[in-house]
Amino acid sequence: MEANFTRALRSNKQLAEEENAKGLPKDVSKRTADGNLENGGKKRILGDITNRTKNTSGKTIPKKETKSKASENSVSSVAEKVSYGKSLRSQTSKSSSSSEESVMYVTALEENDSVLETSSLMVPEDTQIEINEIETAPAIPKGIDDFDASCLDDPNNAAAYAYEIFKYYKKREQKFQIKKYLHKQPEITSSMRAILVDWLVEVQESFELNHETLYLSVKVVDMYLMQEIVSKAKLQLIGAVAMFIASKFDERNPPLVDDFLYICDDSYERKEFLETETKILLAIRFNLGIPLSYRFLRRYGRCARVSMEMLTLARYILEMSLMDYEVVDILDSKIAAAALLLAHKMKHSAWSPTLEFYSGYKESELIELAMRLNRNISARSVRQLMTIRTKYSHDVFFCVANIEPLLTTNLGSSDMKTVTSLN
């Protein structure tokens, strides 16, 4: 049963290898997709990543002319930006080849500015936070490295708000905590889920997507499976659509629908793919601003000023945990801290007071979880689950996958010893 599922996931990889052997370029998926697109085969990037409404004639539905006077003042600044943007676009559109083509790329802001004008622009109740609830950065205790203070001159770091941002993340992550769900899924096993995650890592590498996109994809898959029953035949579809959604949320140039259909070996129809996207978004209530373990890990590593090799080792440990169903219910901030703790132990380094301060976790709180993560990287390699190991065995990632794990029996002691032999 699982062998058939593995074969289905790997079929697209075999197809790619066959095409490479024939001398086809690596971007054959996108070239194949371009032939089916409109406008003479040109790639319409906005065509697949926007939800624009059209009438039967193909023209954009005109916006409403009505306007609520009660909300006029509350959106005055937004209206000014919209009108300013329109004036700029009206000046540049004169040089376009046709007026119809310029209508084709109307932005979502232009189409929905009437909605902005009539809305109250109120934050949803479940995301509102009272001003007095936001914790200000505390005085840094003696002996703790004040990383944010050293970055105040760099606007890209938002150092003045970093502490409050991650405090908010830690509160918000509890809203997205996954509960064990496989006992409700009659056809899906933990091994199938692991194979799916391994395949998503492969897709992330093929499309050169951000790591945040990968972690968000896995989170969306778990959130959906926690609520809906999915058949084994549709599991790959759920994974592909989840990564498509995550790409639109996190990528500057997300892959097209046709690209995802291609990597699924054309096992699904375009209509089915888009319908599944709607189902997933409705199931998760369009909540995509999820605090991810990868972001927590990067924050901890930067605050403690760990080396790039140390951080990459922790990333490898954390990415391996994505395949482990038994840790899906662990908070993202905690599993990120445990991965960094294990990386420190593997490199014979201690869990510093700085790490304890910024992560909020003591070493004693993370030992048991670190033991679980150590077992993940110590397990014998399985042929269907080699993508992450192979990825982090490359020189670009400092070959961290080749670093010997720790003895599980000694992981809880103060003098943990490395494994001398894996035989």
Image (tube, rainbow, N blue to C red):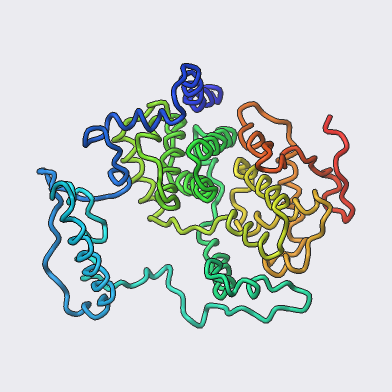
Instruction: Evaluate whether residue 265 shows in this view.
Output: yes
- The quadrant holding residue 149 is bottom right
Position in image of residue 110 (x %, y %): 22, 61
Residue at 57% of width from left, 67% of height from top?
Answer: 166
- Total marks in image: 0
> Where is 152 relative to 271, above or below?
below
Q: Is residue 114 left or right of residue 131?
A: left
In the current view of this chain or complex, which residue is farthest to the front? 95
Position in image of residue 295 (x %, y %): 58, 57
In the foreground, 174 or 277: 277
Q: Is residue 77 left or right of residue 251?
A: left
Position in image of residue 401 (x %, y %): 71, 39
In the foreground, 91 or 391: 91
Instruction: Evaluate whether residue 339 shows in this view.
Output: no
> Where is 322 relative to 152, above or below?
above
Q: Is residue 292 left or right of residue 245?
A: right
Position in image of residue 296 (x %, y %): 61, 59
> Where is 59 relative to 300, above or below?
above
- The quadrant holding residue 145 is bottom right
Residue at 30% of width from left, 72% of height from top?
Answer: 121
Q: Is residue 4 left or right of residue 86?
A: right
**Viewport quadrant of the C terminus:** top right
In the foreground, 106 or 342: 106
- The quadrant holding residue 73 is bottom left
Residue at 13% of width from left, 50% of height from top?
Answer: 99
